[in-house]
């Protein structure tokens, strides 16, 4: 299974439950399809580089988070469909890091570095 990294900008809400629900829904979607979620990290709440419009609303502040995961390409298509339809999502992008874990990890090294990222708990 290929290894992917997703960066998502979610709409900012005063309550943490909205971002928690979005992250949990995305991770469970990967896990239910037989994939592996390797890391979930938060970049925090940030001012957007420009005003963004999504689902008829304008946003100036967003919550940034990342997820590293392994999954089949077909599951990635359904994940993109899920993100497109969710009103909590402003923008997202998925990057393919490698086709196999051996391509990412070096001998004795961690495959994914999250030194500056706070880890979220599901």
Image (cartoon, rainbow, N blue to C red):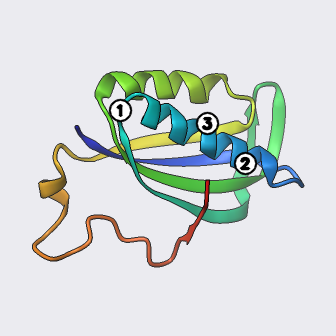
C-alpha gap between disc 3 and disc 2: 10 Å
| Callout in the foreground (1, 3) | 1
Residue nearer the viewer, 31 or 12: 31
Q: How many marks?
A: 3
- N-terminal of the pair, mark 1 or mark 3, is 3
Q: Which residue is mark 2?
A: 19
Q: Specify few, some or many for label 1: CA neighbours under 10 Å numbering under 14, 14-19, or 20 or more.
A: few
Q: Which residue is mark 3?
A: 25
Q: Is residue 6 above or below residue 76?
A: below
Contact (Cβ within 8 Å) of mark 2 with mark 1: no
- N-terminal of the pair, mark 2 or mark 1, is 2
Q: Specify few, some or many for label 2: CA neighbours under 10 Å numbering under 14, 14-19, or 20 or more.
A: many
- N-terminal of the pair, mark 3 or mark 2, is 2
| Callout in the foreground (2, 1) | 1
Q: SS at mark 2?
A: helix
Q: Position of residue 92 (x, y in %)?
A: 55, 40
C-alpha gap between disc 1 and disc 3: 15 Å
Q: SS at mark 1?
A: loop
- Where residue 83 sits, quadrant-wise, is top right
Q: SS at mark 3?
A: helix
Residue nearer the viewer, 3 or 52: 3
Left-right relation of 102 to 55:
left
Which quadrant, please, contains the N terminus?
A: top left
| Residue plotted at (20% across, 75% down) | 109
| Residue plotted at (18% across, 43% down) | 99
Q: Which residue is mark 1?
A: 34
Q: Position of residue 57 (x, y in %)?
A: 84, 32
Name the outermost residue toward the right.
Answer: 14
């Amino acid at each position: 299974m290929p290894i992917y990294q997703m960066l998502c900008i979610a709409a900012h809400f005063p309550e943490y439950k909205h971002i928690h629900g979005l992250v949990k829904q995305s991770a469970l979607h990967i896990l239910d399809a037989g994939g592996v979620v390797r890391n979930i990290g938060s970049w925090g709440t940030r001012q957007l580089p420009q005003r963004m419009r999504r689902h008829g609303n304008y946003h100036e502040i967003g919550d940034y988070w990342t997820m590293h995961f392994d999954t089949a390409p077909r599951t990635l298509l359904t994940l993109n469909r899920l993100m497109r339809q969710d009103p909590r999502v402003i923008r997202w992008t998925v990057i393919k890091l490698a086709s196999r874990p051996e391509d990412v990890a070096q001998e004795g090294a961690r495959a994914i570095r999250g030194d500056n990222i706070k880890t979220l708990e599901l």
